[in-house]
Amino acid sequence: MSDILTIPSSRRLAVGDTLLIDPPEVRQIFFVGGIQFTRADAKLKLALRLADPTVTDVAGETLDGQRVMFPEGLLDRMPEVFVIDDGIQVRALHFNADQNVMYTIEVTETKDGLIRAMLTPGAIVIYGGHARFGRGPCFAPTDTPSDNWENGTDPVTTGIFRMGFPFIAVPVRDVIEHKYHTTPLPATDPKPTAPDSEPDLRRRLGQLVRRTVAQMSADPAVVIELAELLGVDPLDPQTFFTFVGVNRPEVGPEMHVVIRANWKDTVSAPADLGSFEPLCRVFCHFACSTFQHNFPVLRRFKQWTRRGDDRFAFWTTEAAPNTAAIALIVHLMTAPGLQSGKLWDPWLTRAVTLTNRELRAKGDPFQLI
Protein backbone atom coordinates (compact mmCIF):
# COMPACT_ATOMS: atom_id res chain seq x y z
CA MET A 1 0.00 0.00 0.00
CA SER A 2 3.01 2.32 -0.18
CA ASP A 3 1.65 3.65 -3.47
CA ILE A 4 -1.16 5.49 -1.70
CA LEU A 5 0.64 6.58 1.46
CA THR A 6 3.28 9.32 1.60
CA ILE A 7 4.79 10.32 4.93
CA PRO A 8 7.10 13.35 5.16
CA SER A 9 10.35 13.15 7.11
CA SER A 10 9.02 15.81 9.50
CA ARG A 11 6.17 18.27 9.67
CA ARG A 12 5.01 21.28 11.70
CA LEU A 13 1.72 21.73 13.48
CA ALA A 14 0.93 25.02 11.72
CA VAL A 15 2.56 27.90 9.88
CA GLY A 16 5.06 29.56 12.19
CA ASP A 17 5.34 26.62 14.59
CA THR A 18 8.84 25.60 15.62
CA LEU A 19 7.84 22.19 17.02
CA LEU A 20 8.74 19.29 14.74
CA ILE A 21 6.61 16.14 14.92
CA ASP A 22 8.24 12.79 14.29
CA PRO A 23 6.77 11.04 11.25
CA PRO A 24 4.52 8.13 12.19
CA GLU A 25 5.79 4.59 12.05
CA VAL A 26 3.98 2.49 9.44
CA ARG A 27 2.92 -0.99 10.54
CA GLN A 28 1.61 -3.18 7.74
CA ILE A 29 -0.91 -5.93 8.47
CA PHE A 30 -2.01 -8.68 6.08
CA PHE A 31 -5.40 -10.25 6.87
CA VAL A 32 -5.16 -13.66 5.17
CA GLY A 33 -8.35 -15.69 4.66
CA GLY A 34 -8.16 -19.39 3.89
CA ILE A 35 -10.64 -21.82 2.34
CA GLN A 36 -14.07 -21.60 4.02
CA PHE A 37 -12.91 -18.43 5.77
CA THR A 38 -12.93 -15.95 2.91
CA ARG A 39 -15.02 -12.81 3.16
CA ALA A 40 -17.55 -14.16 0.65
CA ASP A 41 -17.88 -17.39 2.60
CA ALA A 42 -18.37 -15.54 5.89
CA LYS A 43 -21.06 -13.33 4.33
CA LEU A 44 -22.84 -16.39 2.89
CA LYS A 45 -22.82 -18.20 6.22
CA LEU A 46 -24.21 -15.12 7.95
CA ALA A 47 -26.96 -14.73 5.33
CA LEU A 48 -27.98 -18.38 5.67
CA ARG A 49 -28.06 -18.04 9.44
CA LEU A 50 -30.22 -14.94 9.30
CA ALA A 51 -32.59 -16.70 6.87
CA ASP A 52 -33.26 -19.36 9.49
CA PRO A 53 -36.81 -18.77 10.84
CA THR A 54 -35.69 -19.84 14.33
CA VAL A 55 -33.37 -16.83 14.56
CA THR A 56 -35.02 -14.15 16.68
CA ASP A 57 -32.07 -12.02 17.73
CA VAL A 58 -31.13 -10.75 14.26
CA ALA A 59 -28.99 -7.90 15.58
CA GLY A 60 -27.11 -10.25 17.88
CA GLU A 61 -26.59 -12.83 15.17
CA THR A 62 -25.37 -10.15 12.77
CA LEU A 63 -22.87 -8.78 15.26
CA ASP A 64 -21.66 -12.25 16.17
CA GLY A 65 -21.32 -13.25 12.52
CA GLN A 66 -19.49 -10.09 11.54
CA ARG A 67 -16.85 -10.41 14.24
CA VAL A 68 -14.88 -12.77 12.01
CA MET A 69 -15.19 -10.61 8.88
CA PHE A 70 -12.94 -7.88 7.54
CA PRO A 71 -13.68 -5.02 7.38
CA GLU A 72 -17.16 -5.51 8.90
CA GLY A 73 -15.94 -6.95 12.19
CA LEU A 74 -13.30 -4.27 12.54
CA LEU A 75 -15.69 -1.43 11.70
CA ASP A 76 -18.17 -2.67 14.31
CA ARG A 77 -15.51 -2.02 16.93
CA MET A 78 -13.54 0.80 15.30
CA PRO A 79 -15.85 2.80 13.00
CA GLU A 80 -13.14 5.42 12.53
CA VAL A 81 -11.04 3.04 10.39
CA PHE A 82 -10.84 4.19 6.76
CA VAL A 83 -11.75 1.36 4.37
CA ILE A 84 -11.00 1.15 0.67
CA ASP A 85 -13.14 -1.43 -1.14
CA ASP A 86 -12.99 -1.24 -4.93
CA GLY A 87 -14.91 -4.47 -5.41
CA ILE A 88 -11.71 -6.38 -6.11
CA GLN A 89 -9.59 -5.80 -3.04
CA VAL A 90 -10.31 -4.60 0.48
CA ARG A 91 -7.78 -2.42 2.28
CA ALA A 92 -7.88 -0.17 5.32
CA LEU A 93 -5.95 2.68 6.93
CA HIS A 94 -5.90 3.81 10.53
CA PHE A 95 -3.75 6.43 12.19
CA ASN A 96 -3.42 6.33 15.97
CA ALA A 97 -2.10 9.76 16.94
CA ASP A 98 -1.28 8.73 20.51
CA GLN A 99 0.76 5.79 19.27
CA ASN A 100 2.09 7.85 16.33
CA VAL A 101 1.55 4.73 14.21
CA MET A 102 -0.10 4.47 10.80
CA TYR A 103 -1.65 1.06 10.20
CA THR A 104 -2.24 -0.34 6.73
CA ILE A 105 -4.31 -3.50 6.39
CA GLU A 106 -4.61 -5.57 3.24
CA VAL A 107 -6.85 -8.58 2.67
CA THR A 108 -5.53 -11.51 0.67
CA GLU A 109 -7.20 -14.88 0.14
CA THR A 110 -4.79 -16.82 -2.10
CA LYS A 111 -1.74 -18.99 -1.56
CA ASP A 112 0.55 -16.66 -3.48
CA GLY A 113 -0.93 -13.80 -1.46
CA LEU A 114 0.18 -15.51 1.76
CA ILE A 115 3.67 -15.97 0.34
CA ARG A 116 3.83 -12.31 -0.71
CA ALA A 117 2.76 -11.30 2.79
CA MET A 118 5.39 -13.50 4.42
CA LEU A 119 8.02 -11.99 2.11
CA THR A 120 7.07 -8.41 3.03
CA PRO A 121 9.81 -7.05 5.33
CA GLY A 122 8.50 -6.05 8.74
CA ALA A 123 4.88 -7.07 8.07
CA ILE A 124 2.33 -8.60 10.44
CA VAL A 125 0.76 -11.65 8.77
CA ILE A 126 -2.46 -13.04 10.30
CA TYR A 127 -3.87 -16.20 8.71
CA GLY A 128 -7.32 -17.44 9.62
CA GLY A 129 -8.52 -20.71 8.15
CA HIS A 130 -7.95 -24.44 8.30
CA ALA A 131 -4.79 -26.22 9.48
CA ARG A 132 -5.58 -29.33 7.38
CA PHE A 133 -4.45 -31.67 10.17
CA GLY A 134 -1.17 -29.76 10.29
CA ARG A 135 -0.31 -29.67 6.60
CA GLY A 136 -0.58 -25.88 6.52
CA PRO A 137 -2.78 -22.95 5.43
CA CYS A 138 -5.21 -23.85 2.64
CA PHE A 139 -6.78 -21.63 -0.03
CA ALA A 140 -9.65 -21.59 -2.52
CA PRO A 141 -12.44 -19.17 -3.44
CA THR A 142 -15.12 -21.76 -2.60
CA ASP A 143 -15.31 -24.87 -0.43
CA THR A 144 -16.39 -27.15 -3.28
CA PRO A 145 -14.87 -30.65 -2.87
CA SER A 146 -11.75 -30.76 -5.06
CA ASP A 147 -7.98 -30.87 -4.99
CA ASN A 148 -8.08 -27.37 -3.52
CA TRP A 149 -8.25 -29.17 -0.17
CA GLU A 150 -4.79 -30.63 -0.86
CA ASN A 151 -2.44 -29.71 -3.73
CA GLY A 152 -4.75 -27.21 -5.42
CA THR A 153 -6.40 -27.02 -8.82
CA ASP A 154 -4.22 -23.97 -9.51
CA PRO A 155 -0.87 -24.60 -7.81
CA VAL A 156 -0.12 -20.87 -7.61
CA THR A 157 -3.26 -19.59 -5.91
CA THR A 158 -5.11 -22.57 -4.38
CA GLY A 159 -4.42 -25.57 -2.20
CA ILE A 160 -2.10 -26.00 0.77
CA PHE A 161 0.91 -23.90 1.61
CA ARG A 162 2.93 -26.70 3.13
CA MET A 163 4.47 -26.23 6.55
CA GLY A 164 3.79 -29.56 8.23
CA PHE A 165 5.70 -32.52 9.63
CA PRO A 166 7.01 -34.99 7.02
CA PHE A 167 4.26 -37.48 7.94
CA ILE A 168 0.68 -36.77 9.00
CA ALA A 169 -2.35 -39.05 9.48
CA VAL A 170 -5.72 -38.00 8.06
CA PRO A 171 -9.12 -39.68 8.38
CA VAL A 172 -10.24 -41.59 5.30
CA ARG A 173 -13.52 -39.73 5.75
CA ASP A 174 -11.74 -36.42 5.08
CA VAL A 175 -10.27 -37.63 1.79
CA ILE A 176 -13.67 -38.87 0.63
CA GLU A 177 -15.61 -35.86 1.89
CA HIS A 178 -13.37 -33.28 0.23
CA LYS A 179 -12.45 -35.45 -2.78
CA TYR A 180 -8.76 -34.58 -3.01
CA HIS A 181 -5.89 -36.65 -4.33
CA THR A 182 -3.10 -37.32 -1.88
CA THR A 183 -0.05 -39.56 -1.46
CA PRO A 184 -0.28 -42.32 1.18
CA LEU A 185 2.84 -43.80 2.71
CA PRO A 186 3.42 -47.34 1.39
CA ALA A 187 4.10 -49.92 4.09
CA THR A 188 7.12 -51.01 2.06
CA ASP A 189 8.76 -47.71 3.06
CA PRO A 190 10.38 -47.33 6.47
CA LYS A 191 7.93 -46.74 9.29
CA PRO A 192 7.76 -43.04 10.21
CA THR A 193 10.04 -42.02 13.03
CA ALA A 194 8.75 -40.03 16.00
CA PRO A 195 10.65 -36.81 15.16
CA ASP A 196 9.23 -36.84 11.62
CA SER A 197 5.66 -37.54 12.72
CA GLU A 198 3.02 -34.95 13.58
CA PRO A 199 2.24 -35.32 17.32
CA ASP A 200 -1.19 -36.94 16.78
CA LEU A 201 0.48 -39.56 14.56
CA ARG A 202 3.46 -39.86 16.90
CA ARG A 203 1.15 -41.05 19.67
CA ARG A 204 -0.15 -43.78 17.32
CA LEU A 205 3.09 -45.13 15.88
CA GLY A 206 2.81 -48.27 17.99
CA GLN A 207 -0.70 -48.88 16.62
CA LEU A 208 0.08 -48.67 12.91
CA VAL A 209 -1.34 -51.50 10.83
CA ARG A 210 -0.50 -52.34 7.22
CA ARG A 211 -3.72 -52.32 5.17
CA THR A 212 -4.67 -52.42 1.52
CA VAL A 213 -7.13 -49.84 0.25
CA ALA A 214 -9.80 -52.54 0.19
CA GLN A 215 -9.24 -53.05 3.92
CA MET A 216 -9.73 -49.37 4.74
CA SER A 217 -13.51 -49.48 4.37
CA ALA A 218 -16.29 -52.08 4.44
CA ASP A 219 -18.18 -50.14 1.76
CA PRO A 220 -17.14 -51.22 -1.78
CA ALA A 221 -18.17 -47.84 -3.21
CA VAL A 222 -15.95 -46.03 -0.72
CA VAL A 223 -13.06 -48.35 -1.57
CA ILE A 224 -13.39 -47.57 -5.29
CA GLU A 225 -13.48 -43.83 -4.70
CA LEU A 226 -10.69 -43.89 -2.13
CA ALA A 227 -8.44 -45.95 -4.39
CA GLU A 228 -8.78 -43.39 -7.17
CA LEU A 229 -7.98 -40.52 -4.78
CA LEU A 230 -4.95 -42.36 -3.38
CA GLY A 231 -3.75 -43.27 -6.87
CA VAL A 232 -3.96 -47.07 -6.64
CA ASP A 233 -6.11 -49.89 -7.99
CA PRO A 234 -8.95 -50.97 -5.65
CA LEU A 235 -7.70 -54.58 -5.82
CA ASP A 236 -4.00 -53.72 -5.49
CA PRO A 237 -2.38 -55.87 -2.78
CA GLN A 238 -0.06 -53.00 -1.88
CA THR A 239 -0.42 -51.97 1.76
CA PHE A 240 -0.18 -48.60 3.49
CA PHE A 241 0.31 -47.48 7.09
CA THR A 242 -3.03 -46.94 8.84
CA PHE A 243 -4.64 -46.91 12.27
CA VAL A 244 -8.13 -46.66 13.72
CA GLY A 245 -8.53 -43.76 16.09
CA VAL A 246 -10.72 -40.89 17.24
CA ASN A 247 -10.09 -37.53 15.62
CA ARG A 248 -13.44 -35.98 16.61
CA PRO A 249 -15.43 -37.34 19.58
CA GLU A 250 -18.71 -36.71 17.76
CA VAL A 251 -17.59 -38.99 14.92
CA GLY A 252 -15.97 -41.74 16.99
CA PRO A 253 -13.34 -44.26 15.86
CA GLU A 254 -12.48 -44.03 12.18
CA MET A 255 -9.83 -45.21 9.78
CA HIS A 256 -6.78 -42.98 9.34
CA VAL A 257 -4.14 -43.27 6.65
CA VAL A 258 -0.61 -41.88 6.90
CA ILE A 259 0.26 -39.46 4.10
CA ARG A 260 3.38 -37.67 2.97
CA ALA A 261 3.15 -34.01 3.91
CA ASN A 262 6.36 -32.14 4.84
CA TRP A 263 7.46 -28.49 4.78
CA LYS A 264 10.25 -28.60 2.19
CA ASP A 265 10.93 -30.19 -1.19
CA THR A 266 7.21 -30.95 -1.53
CA VAL A 267 4.94 -31.40 -4.52
CA SER A 268 3.71 -27.86 -3.82
CA ALA A 269 7.14 -26.20 -4.03
CA PRO A 270 7.79 -23.28 -4.19
CA ALA A 271 4.62 -22.96 -2.10
CA ASP A 272 6.21 -24.52 0.96
CA LEU A 273 8.07 -23.17 3.95
CA GLY A 274 11.37 -24.62 2.81
CA SER A 275 11.43 -22.62 -0.42
CA PHE A 276 12.11 -19.17 1.06
CA GLU A 277 13.06 -17.25 4.17
CA PRO A 278 10.12 -15.31 5.66
CA LEU A 279 10.81 -11.59 6.01
CA CYS A 280 7.68 -10.69 7.98
CA ARG A 281 8.13 -9.55 11.56
CA VAL A 282 5.06 -11.33 12.94
CA PHE A 283 3.42 -14.54 11.72
CA CYS A 284 0.07 -15.59 13.21
CA HIS A 285 -1.28 -19.02 12.26
CA PHE A 286 -4.83 -19.02 13.62
CA ALA A 287 -6.24 -22.44 12.76
CA CYS A 288 -6.92 -25.61 14.74
CA SER A 289 -4.16 -26.63 17.17
CA THR A 290 -1.38 -24.95 15.20
CA PHE A 291 0.91 -24.79 18.24
CA GLN A 292 1.02 -28.57 18.14
CA HIS A 293 1.00 -28.89 14.35
CA ASN A 294 3.20 -26.13 13.02
CA PHE A 295 5.12 -24.36 15.78
CA PRO A 296 7.82 -27.10 15.83
CA VAL A 297 8.12 -26.97 12.05
CA LEU A 298 8.68 -23.21 11.84
CA ARG A 299 10.83 -22.89 14.95
CA ARG A 300 12.78 -26.17 15.02
CA PHE A 301 12.85 -27.55 11.46
CA LYS A 302 12.94 -24.24 9.59
CA GLN A 303 14.86 -22.57 12.45
CA TRP A 304 12.93 -19.32 12.00
CA THR A 305 13.44 -18.28 15.62
CA ARG A 306 13.23 -15.05 17.58
CA ARG A 307 16.01 -12.58 16.91
CA GLY A 308 15.76 -9.77 19.42
CA ASP A 309 12.56 -7.83 18.71
CA ASP A 310 11.86 -9.66 15.47
CA ARG A 311 10.46 -12.97 14.18
CA PHE A 312 7.42 -13.22 16.43
CA ALA A 313 4.97 -16.07 15.90
CA PHE A 314 1.61 -16.87 17.52
CA TRP A 315 -0.46 -20.03 17.38
CA THR A 316 -3.64 -21.65 18.68
CA THR A 317 -3.82 -24.29 21.40
CA GLU A 318 -6.98 -26.15 20.33
CA ALA A 319 -9.68 -26.32 17.66
CA ALA A 320 -10.14 -22.71 16.64
CA PRO A 321 -13.14 -20.99 15.10
CA ASN A 322 -12.01 -17.92 13.19
CA THR A 323 -12.57 -15.44 16.01
CA ALA A 324 -9.09 -14.23 16.99
CA ALA A 325 -7.86 -12.19 14.03
CA ILE A 326 -10.15 -9.16 14.29
CA ALA A 327 -9.81 -9.06 18.08
CA LEU A 328 -6.01 -9.11 17.86
CA ILE A 329 -5.95 -6.31 15.27
CA VAL A 330 -8.22 -4.15 17.45
CA HIS A 331 -6.00 -4.58 20.48
CA LEU A 332 -2.90 -3.80 18.44
CA MET A 333 -4.37 -0.61 17.00
CA THR A 334 -5.82 0.66 20.29
CA ALA A 335 -2.86 0.11 22.61
CA PRO A 336 -2.36 3.24 24.75
CA GLY A 337 0.63 5.55 24.59
CA LEU A 338 3.46 6.13 22.17
CA GLN A 339 4.37 3.00 20.18
CA SER A 340 6.35 4.49 17.30
CA GLY A 341 9.98 3.54 17.62
CA LYS A 342 9.30 1.36 20.67
CA LEU A 343 9.92 -2.36 21.14
CA TRP A 344 7.17 -4.55 19.70
CA ASP A 345 7.31 -7.27 22.35
CA PRO A 346 5.25 -5.46 25.05
CA TRP A 347 2.79 -4.20 22.42
CA LEU A 348 2.23 -7.69 21.01
CA THR A 349 2.10 -9.36 24.42
CA ARG A 350 -0.60 -6.95 25.58
CA ALA A 351 -2.71 -7.57 22.46
CA VAL A 352 -2.44 -11.36 22.76
CA THR A 353 -3.34 -11.24 26.46
CA LEU A 354 -6.44 -9.12 25.83
CA THR A 355 -7.47 -11.29 22.88
CA ASN A 356 -7.24 -14.40 25.05
CA ARG A 357 -9.46 -12.74 27.66
CA GLU A 358 -12.06 -12.10 24.95
CA LEU A 359 -11.87 -15.68 23.73
CA ARG A 360 -12.40 -17.03 27.24
CA ALA A 361 -15.31 -14.66 27.86
CA LYS A 362 -17.02 -15.81 24.65
CA GLY A 363 -16.44 -19.48 25.44
CA ASP A 364 -14.10 -20.13 22.51
CA PRO A 365 -12.19 -23.40 23.03
CA PHE A 366 -8.70 -22.12 22.28
CA GLN A 367 -6.08 -19.59 23.35
CA LEU A 368 -3.27 -17.85 21.52
CA ILE A 369 0.24 -18.76 22.48
Image (tube, rainbow, N blue to C red):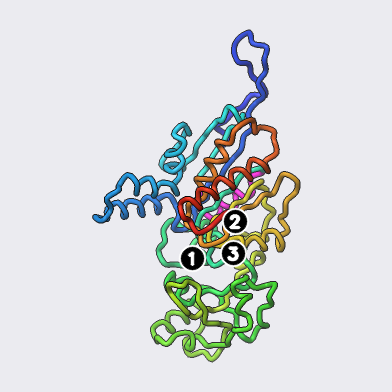
Q: Is residue 364 left or right of residue 196?
A: left
Q: Which mark is residue 149?
A: 1
Front residue of 359 and 300: 359
Q: Amino acid at mark 2?
A: Trp
Residue type beneath disc 1? Trp
Mark closest to the chain's N terminus, 2 or 3: 3
Q: Nearer the viewer, mark 2 or mark 3?
A: 2
Task: Give the x, y percent position of residue 340.
Answer: 66, 32
Which label is found at residue 268? 3
Amino acid at pointer 3: Ser
Of the residues under marks 1 and 3, which one precedes in the sequence? 1
Q: Magenta span has 113?
A: yes
* Residue name at image x 70 percent, y 38 percent: 343
- Side of 300 where 233 appears, left or right: left
Q: Quadrant of the C terminus?
A: bottom right
Return the x and y of residue 310 as percentages of the image width and height. Answer: 71, 46
Q: Is residue 236 magenta?
A: no
* Sequence-wise first label, 2 or 1: 1
Label 2 residue SS: loop
Residue 265 place in picture, x, y as percent: 66, 66
For image coordinates 67% across by 59% down, the residue present is 298
Label 1, secondary structure: give it.
helix
Q: Which residues are magenta?
A: 108-121
Is residue 201 rendered to the left or right of residue 180?
A: right
Locate residue 27, reporting x and y percent.
61, 38
- Find out whether the residues at labels 2 and 1 contact each other: C-beta distance under 8 Å: no
- Residue found at x 66% / y 65%: 264
Per the rendering, the mark at residue 315 is: 2
Compared with 1, 126 (above or below) is below
**Label of residue 63 in the image:** none
Q: Quadrant of residue 344?
A: top right
